[in-house]
């Protein structure tokens, strides 16, 4: 009797299939989020390849380049929390569109700078424009996915990073060696050709990304209602108001996670943003194209590491120890790269180990972050962890540039090595939430299925 009544109800009133609903959301949202995040990271790392010829033309040494790469994160730090507050007010679609269009235009204009001072200004403006993008994406996922499903989506978001580095390496080197249109230097085209896609993708986001399940035309009313009620039951109903959101600033977990992220980011950005110059020093005869192709190799291992680490973490009885081990392996790999710099083959192997460890760390870490910060505090809490953590994006490149003495990049890698070790120590002092940590890793495991 109940079955016949259910069958007679309109499709919008029937109880939805949770797995089918989550699958529908994933197919509609994740491709947009993935492509947008790939473009974001390409626009972060393009400076490393532009520097291969820009440095000679404008007379920019390693120390000045390190400062230019770092300034981006100072702006990011100051503007990220305000950006995420505005995102929660104006909606993800409108604000992420603004972010992408503005950073794309700044990137294009960077192709027309004429001195180091203009580069400093453009990098600061890029940080202002892009501030809030990553935590905005994290916040967006909390509105569309339950805890167990969210980690799966987060895993694919993190997976966009090594893909971006591969694309940046592949095309960055080719552009530097081969594109000299309209009398412009090739390094200028690196910025122009990587900035335009951000503007175009911003338009796609505006047209295709709903602000909430209720606004998604491709969800039935029952699916949108089930999703909203499920998230509310899991996280509690959201309390509106800036004061409630700013309570995240008093959350001790937010501070601890921020410090972990800052230490780890000091190491990862010091490594990633200097990778083209590290490869150039290891292989002085390499052209920009060869450097670009070689830079792709470590990120192939990084992409594999993201997927395989999910299975390893899921089976590990002590999650924090496994996360900390990724940071320690990154330190060991980078140490070997410095010691073996005169042996290009072995040095490249060490760099691959470093990249794999760095990216294996990220998805488990961010899954734990989202599950330790409640829904009301998510917009501010995630932004604080990311913005304070991204100060490491300032310290890493800056310290590598200063430690290099203006020429020998590998000597400056001592700072990232020490930062990876510090991150591991801080992780071990993080109070364990057994249920949350276990759930977060179980969800990440689904990314490989």
Image (tube, rainbow, N blue to C red):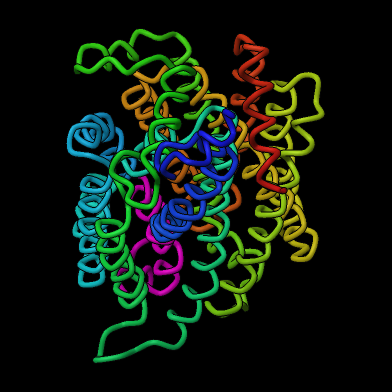
Q: Is residue 43 magenta?
A: yes
- Whether residue 361 sits left or right of residue 88 in the image: it is right
Q: Tag count in the figure?
A: 0
Residue 199 seen in render: yes
Question: What's the residue at 74%, 49% (across, down)?
Answer: 353
User: Most extreme residue toward the front, as rendered?
Assistant: 1
Q: Which residues are magenta?
A: 42-70
- Whether residue 279 sits left or right of residue 256 in the image: it is right
Question: What's the residue at 71%, 56% (across, down)?
Answer: 301
Residue 439 drawn at (x, y percent): 65, 24
User: Most extreme residue toward the bottom, as rendered?
Assistant: 182
- Whether residue 303 sits left or right of residue 165 in the image: it is right
Q: Quadrant of residue 48?
A: bottom left
Residue 192 drawn at (x, y percent): 29, 73
- Whether residue 325 sits left or right of residue 79 in the image: it is right
Residue 272 drawn at (x, y percent): 53, 52
154 over 45 or under it: above or below = above
Question: What's the residue at 44%, 32% (across, down)?
Answer: 227
Question: What's the residue at 28%, 44% (across, down)?
Answer: 215
431 over 98 or under it: above or below = above
């Amino acid at each position: 009797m109940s079955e016949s009544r259910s069958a007679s109800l309109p499709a919008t009133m029937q109880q939805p299939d949770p797995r089918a609903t989550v699958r529908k959301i994933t197919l509609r949202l994740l491709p947009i989020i993935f492509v947008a995040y790939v473009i974001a990271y390409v626009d972060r790392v393009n400076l490393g390849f532009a520097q291969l010829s820009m440095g000679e033309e404008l007379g920019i040494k390693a120390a000045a380049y390190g400062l230019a790469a770092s300034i981006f994160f100072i702006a990011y730090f100051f503007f990220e929390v305000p950006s995420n507050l505005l995102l929660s007010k104006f909606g993800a679609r409108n604000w992420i569109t603004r972010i992408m269009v503005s950073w794309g235009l700044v990137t294009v204009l960077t192709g027309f700078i004429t001195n180091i001072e203009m580069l400093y200004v453009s990098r600061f403006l890029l940080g202002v424009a892009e501030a809030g993008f990553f935590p905005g994406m994290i916040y967006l996922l909390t509105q569309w996915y339950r805890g167990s499903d969210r980690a799966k989506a987060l895993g694919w978001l993190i997976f966009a990073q090594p893909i971006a580095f591969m694309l940046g390496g592949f095309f960055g080197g080719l552009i530097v060696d081969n594109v000299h249109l309209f009398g412009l230097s090739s390094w200028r085209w690196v910025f122009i050709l990587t900035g335009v896609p951000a503007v175009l993708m911003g338009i796609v986001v505006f047209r295709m990304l709903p602000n909430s399940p209720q606004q998604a035309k491709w969800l039935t009313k029952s699916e949108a209602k089930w999703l909203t009620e499920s998230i509310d039951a899991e996280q509690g109903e959201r309390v509106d108001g800036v004061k409630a959101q700013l309570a995240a600033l008093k959350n001790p977990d937010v501070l601890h996670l921020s410090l972990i992220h800052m230490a780890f980011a000091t190491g990862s950005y010091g490594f990633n943003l200097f990778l083209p110059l590290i490869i150039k020093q290891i292989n002085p005869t390499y052209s920009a194209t060869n450097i670009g192709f070689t830079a792709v190799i470590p990120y192939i291992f990084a992409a594999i590491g993201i997927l395989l680490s999910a299975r390893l973490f899921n089976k590990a009885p002590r999650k924090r120890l496994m996360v900390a081990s990724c940071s320690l392996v990154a330190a060991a790999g980078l140490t070997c790269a410095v010691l073996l710099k005169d042996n290009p083959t072995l040095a490249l192997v060490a760099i691959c180990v470093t990249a794999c460890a760095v990216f294996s760390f990220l998805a488990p870490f961010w899954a734990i972050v989202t599950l330790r910060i409640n829904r009301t505090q998510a917009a501010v809490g995630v932004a604080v962890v990311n913005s304070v953590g991204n100060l490491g994006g300032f310290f890493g490149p800056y310290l590598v540039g200063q430690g290099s003495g203006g020429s020998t990049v590998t000597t400056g890698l001592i700072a990232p090595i020490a930062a990876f070790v510090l991150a591991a120590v801080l992780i071990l002092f993080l109070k364990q939430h057994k249920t949350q940590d276990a759930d977060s890793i179980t969800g990440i495991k689904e990314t490989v299925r």
